[in-house]
Image (cartoon, rainbow, N blue to C red):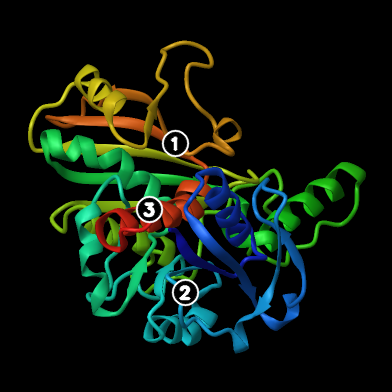
Amino acid sequence: MGYRVVVVGATGNVGREMLNILAEREFPCDEIAAVASSRSHGIELEFGETGKMLKVQNIENFDFTGWDIALFAAGSGPTKIYAPKAASQGCIVIDNSSLYRMDPDVPLVVPEVNPEAIDGYKAKNIIANPNCSTAQMVVALKPLHDAAKIKRVVVATYQSVSGAGKEGMDELFVQSRAIFVGDQVEVKKFTKQIAFNVIPHIDVFLDDGSTKEEWKMVAETKKILDPAIKISATCVRVPVFVGHSEAINIEFERELSASQAQDILREAPGVMLIDKREDGGYVTPVECVGDYATFISRVREDPTVDSGLSLWCVSDNLRKGAALNAVQIAELLGRRHLKKG
């Protein structure tokens, strides 16, 4: 016996990826529904590579009664309206938006990092999925934190345009083509030209000069991993279609050598260590697309502090940063609480 699963926002980048991953991982679905806004009503989507076609249903009149799990990839606006509705009708919501992440009554879960947190879902029948850049970072940090206790993290991100949705991907493509053929470059989605450029600005600016994306990384890491960790983040949009990269510097309470860290990361859940000190002995965003793992490379000691390491972290942001983590939460929910399949 399996689950009845709803994917809300099924026509977007993350929603489509959720459908693909549910099929790839053979999540035990007795029934699956693809739901989106009225604009997408009636569109047909393929459920992974199963050959099964799903007709998109209108969220405005969808009844969640009798459905077990709803994976939301619809953005904060629709989620604010429909997630409480689904939860009140007995359907457990796994939400990919930022709306509930810092709600003290909603668990913020990365299954490889804090699986026990999921037990708090019953307060609101809602579980939050972290920000894409946070998700891959805490997968890398967790085993090292367990080994030597992290005091401080300084991270610079190199985030792909898919993090800004289809409009972001389209803008990179259109601007790149315009530059090649000598046409005028138009800026619509981003604040500056993204083709052949980098933009040190993701989400809105806050009073202290940081952006909301940077604040999310700080606040979410503290909630997921340890509130005592000090974190400084600089989040940058780069002209890459899919795959987020991060340069992470870590200071520990206890000594941890690079070789010890490599041994720990080699065995860590969700991590793939590819770290050869030679040309090409590391992973780039292009190579991580379509993969489940969080890839770690360039592990080395930081001589400027008593016990510090620097490393390079790459992951498919549409997968581990969003859709995969949501499906993993659903799998964890099934193992710990729902007991079907």
Q: As drawn, is 200 to the left or to the right of 47?
A: left
Residue plotted at (56% across, 43% down): 24
Q: Quadrant of the N terminus?
A: bottom left
Is the Cβ of the residue at disc 1 closer than 8 Å to that at disc 2?
Answer: no
Is the Cβ of the residue at disc 3 closer than 8 Å to that at disc 2?
Answer: no
Where is 238 relative to 119, above or below? Answer: above
Q: Position of residue 315 (x, y in %)?
A: 48, 40
Is the Cβ of the residue at disc 3 closer than 8 Å to that at disc 1?
Answer: no
Disc 1: which residue:
293
Q: As drawn, is 245 to the left or to the right of 177?
A: left
Residue 56: assigned label: none
Mark 3 or mark 2: whose residue is earlier in sequence: 2
Give the camera-side residue of 235 and 322. 322
Disc 3: which residue:
331
Instruction: Label 2: state its secondary structure.
Output: loop
Residue 67: assigned label: 2
Instruction: Label 1: state its secondary structure.
Output: loop
Residue type at mark 2?
Answer: Trp
Give the camera-side residue of 50 and 186. 50
Residue plotted at (12% across, 29% down): 306
Residue type at mark 3?
Answer: Glu
Q: Position of residue 78 (x, y in %)?
A: 54, 81
Asked if one can make out residue 6 in the rendered structure from this viewpoint, the answer is yes
Question: Most extreme residue toward the left, as rendered?
Answer: 254
Q: Quadrant of the C terminus?
A: bottom left
Distance between mark 3 and mark 1 Cα atoms: 17 Å
Distance between mark 3 and mark 2 Cα atoms: 16 Å
